[in-house]
Amino acid sequence: MSSNEAPLDPANVQGDILVGLPKKVQHYLLFQIDDDVVAFRKKLNLLIPHITTTAQVQHDRAKIAAHKKAVAELGDAPKLLRLSHINIAFSHAGLAKLGIHDNIGDSAFTTGQLADAKNLGDPGTTIDGKFNPNWMHAFKQPIHGLVIVSGESERTVDATHATVLGIFNVGARITLHEVFTLKGVVRPGAQKGHEHFGFLDGISQPAVKDFDTKPNPGQKT
């Protein structure tokens, strides 16, 4: 049976989706789109060349592996390569702001996390039938999107973060409002690669067609 589906192109998929961005430090920039949507779209176009693709991550991970091998052969401890990466995601509200109204059939995505907080078991109070989760004020604001900035050090990530804000003219002719930036670092010691709740990350990923050519037992879907 033939298919008209185009094969997966790693150069057209953001890097954090399939292989994960290599990092020691990561910023999550939650933002709102300004009312001048046309201006934001123009600035978004300027960001596109900075977006890290899966192909770029594969290249960078190969570079890291080669660097580790080279210094190991010399008997030295490897130093971290200076690398930074950028990915972006939009909420349903953000897509609607941009005039995109596709129905993907996901009610949780459409209504947003705030509306689903009670169902998720988040602590909070109910007043006059309305549930108010005990969230930080920033997270209760309308969030149109998220920019992920990662790198090997806080210094590198700070510089790349500033580049993102500069593209959208934050502080001058604003097209993007920074609501909140959550900063994270990899967990130390034996907890490296583990989530904050203890689970080892990335060990139960389903195989992706046209990408995972040698899936592990049980990984096929």
Image: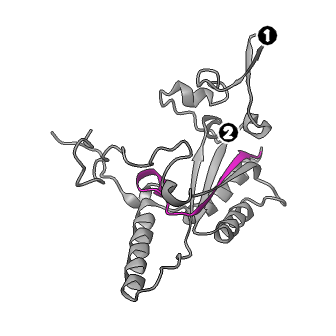
Give the answer, above or below, for where 51 lies relative to 99: below
- Give the magenta range: 15-34
Q: Which mark is residue 97?
A: 2
How much space separates mark 1 and mark 2, taking CA atoms? 30 Å
Where is residue 122 shown, x and y percent of the image?
65, 26
Position of 68 with respect to 92 (left or right) is left
Identify which residue, 141 or 186, lies in the foreground.
Answer: 186
Where is residue 25 shown, x and y percent of the image?
61, 62
Is residue 179 found inside the magenta-colored segment of the image? no
Under mark 2, the amino acid is: Lys
Where is residue 22 shown, x and y percent of the image?
49, 63
- At x 65% / y 35%, what residue is drawn? 93
Give the answer, above or below, for where 87 lies relative to 132: below
Determine crowd level at label 2: few under 14, some 14-19, many 20+ residues with C-alpha closer than 10 A.
some
Position of 54 with respect to 29 (left or right) is left
Direction top: furthest residue: 128
- At x 57% / y 69%, what residue is drawn? 152
Determine crowd level at label 1: few under 14, some 14-19, many 20+ residues with C-alpha closer than 10 A.
few
From the image, state whether disc 1 or disc 2 is nearer to you.
1
- At x 41% / y 49%, what residue is drawn? 202
Q: Circle 1 sits on which residue?
A: 128
